[in-house]
Every structure is written in C-alpha cells, then in structure tokens.
Image (cartoon, grey):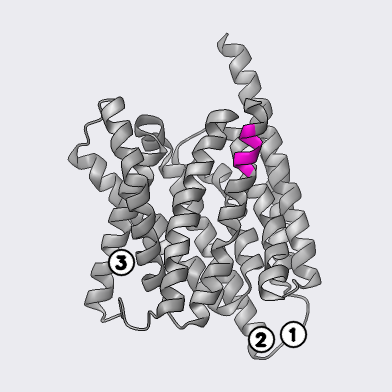
Amino acid sequence: MSKYKGYIFIFLTALCFSTQEISGKYLAMDKLNAYQINSVAFLIGATILLPFAISDMRKFHIKLKTKDWLYFLLLGVIQVSVGMSLLQEALVFTTPAIVAILVCSNAIMTVPLARIVNKEQFDPRSWIAIIIAAIGIIVIFNPFAGAAGKDAEQHLIGVTLALLGAISIALFNVLATKTIKKYGKAVTNSFSFYLGVLVMFIFMLIFHIPIIKGINGHSFALLVYVGVVVKGLGFFFFLGAMKETSAITATSVFYIKPILVPILMLLIMGEMITTNVLIGTIIIIIASLIIFQIKRINARQNSISAH
C-alpha cells in the first residue's frame, strides 16, 4: 500500500509542477515582469515551507552559522533570482511546453556539472544520455527550418533563455547537494527562497522595477496559486514521494512533467505543440530515462557494496 501511495504522491507532484509554466505564461500575458512574479510566488512558497524547516531544525538540533546563511544566499540567487527569472522571461517569447521540457532536462545537465563542481564520480554511460539530450535540444531549437521573421526570432530567444535557466537550476541542484544532505530539503529550500526573494526586491528597488504595480485580481490569484500549489503543495507531495519510495524514484516526476504539460496546454490554453517540439521532447525524455536508469543501477550497486 505504501508503494502505491508513493506513486500517487509522484503523480500529484508532477501535476502541481506541470501547471507552473502555464500559470507563468498567463502572468506574462498580464504584463507582469519576471521579478514581480517570482518574488511573490517564492515568498509564498518559502513561507509555506518554513514550518517544515523549523520542525527539521528542532528535530535534528540544527544551528545555522554565518557561512550557512551565505551559502543559502548563493543558492537563492542562482535558483530564484537568476534561474527562475530566466525561465519566466522565456515564457514571454515561447510556449510553456518548451520551457517545461528544457527545465526537466536539468536532470541530465547536473551529471557533468556534479563532476566539475563536486568532483563526483562520472559514469561514462552518461555520455549516451547527454549526447541524445543535446540532439533533442537542437531539434527544439529547429535551426535548419530556415524560418525567419519575428516569430522565429522570438522562438530562438525563448529557447535560449529557457536553456540558460535550466543550466542555472542544474547548478543549484549540484551546489545544494551538501546542504540538503546536512540540513534537508525544507531548510535548504525555504531559506534560499527567502534570500533569493530578498535579492530580487533589492534589485527591483535599485533599478525602479515595479513590485506591486500592474498586479490585478486575476494576476494576484495566479501568483497565490503558484506560491501555494506549485511551490507549497508540490514540494509537500514531493517530500511524500521521497518518503514512500526513494529519492531517485521520486525524481521520475521530472520525466512525467514533459508529458503532462502539452496535455494541460491543450486542455487549458487550446494550444498544440509543433512537430519539432514533440520530437525533441520525446528525445529528451528518452535521454532522461537513460540517466534515471543509470542512477538506479548505481544506487543499487552502492547499496549492495555497503552491505
């Protein structure tokens, strides 16, 4: 029963996460800037995660030092201030499906980054997935289509921004490994969210970027939805998925999301994805599944050798 409960959590997590880009697209259509959207959404998300973080700190007697806060600040800038802002800005130029699939490809990007940054062991078989994923990204870029004009230019800008955002998220995942192992996901995410939002607020004040201006009833409801459902409930379900299955099995959320987003786009927005995006998505999902399988095999082998 516990196993099935874990799979239910995985699906619910994927469903919550899959609505992020669609909500972001509507917020972009409301003419809100990326910093407005992310600062409010992540502030709500950080506040929802705070009780979990405090509970973990009490349970495991965690005391944070100055260097820990500085590290959380770095993580917040990389993920919230830079990565998520790039992804939100990408939605101005391209579709939620493209942004979602490139975000999910960060699971592949973390492999070489973990080798470079954390000196983690690199499985040579991972090159297969990396090369396949690169082909998928090229197909989504569609550089050989010969298209010109405003739409083609916007597509390229959107894909480039989404790719840079995905790399930022992958870097966050790599750098956050040690704090997650030491303090847990709730502490790491809640405090890095708060500090990332703080940096955005300072940036917005310095450069006179609107913080509240332009937010109406419709956009406020969407911001609350993203904060509560995507950041809050999504994280809660993800923790449940990890608890009932395993950390590696729970990451299958990011292989389900690229399938769900186009379906939700069609149901909610009435939009179909183009053929090249569909093909690119399938290629990247295959690459992600290869990485997923390699991680499972290695985790199983490490578990056997530990005993």
Amino acid beneath label 1 = Ala
| 133 to the left or right of 77 | right
Question: Of circles 1 and 3, which is in front?
Answer: 3
- Residue 125: give x, y in percent of width and height: 71, 36
Using a 10 Å C-alpha cutoff, classify the residue at mark 2 as few (fewer than 14 neighbours), some (14 to 19) or many (20 or more).
Answer: few
Q: Residue at x 37, y 72 (%)?
A: 36
Q: Quadrant of residue 35?
A: bottom left
Q: How many marks?
A: 3
Q: Residue at x 57, y 52 (%)?
A: 106
- Residue at which label 3 appears: 200
**Residue 107 can be seen in this image:** no
- Residue at which label 1 appears: 147
| 208 to the left or right of 175 | left
Task: Find numbered disc 2 in the image and state the secondary structure of the residue it sits on.
Answer: helix
Using a 10 Å C-alpha cutoff, classify the residue at mark 3 as few (fewer than 14 neighbours), some (14 to 19) or many (20 or more).
Answer: many
Task: Find numbered disc 1 in the image and state the secondary structure of the residue it sits on.
Answer: loop
Q: Marks 2 and 3, how far apart in space?
A: 30 Å
Q: Residue at x 78, y 79 (%)?
A: 145
Q: Marks 1 and 2, how far apart in space?
A: 9 Å
Q: Residue at x 72, y 76 (%)?
A: 270
Q: In the rendered image of this protein, does residue 78 appear above or below residue 7?
A: below
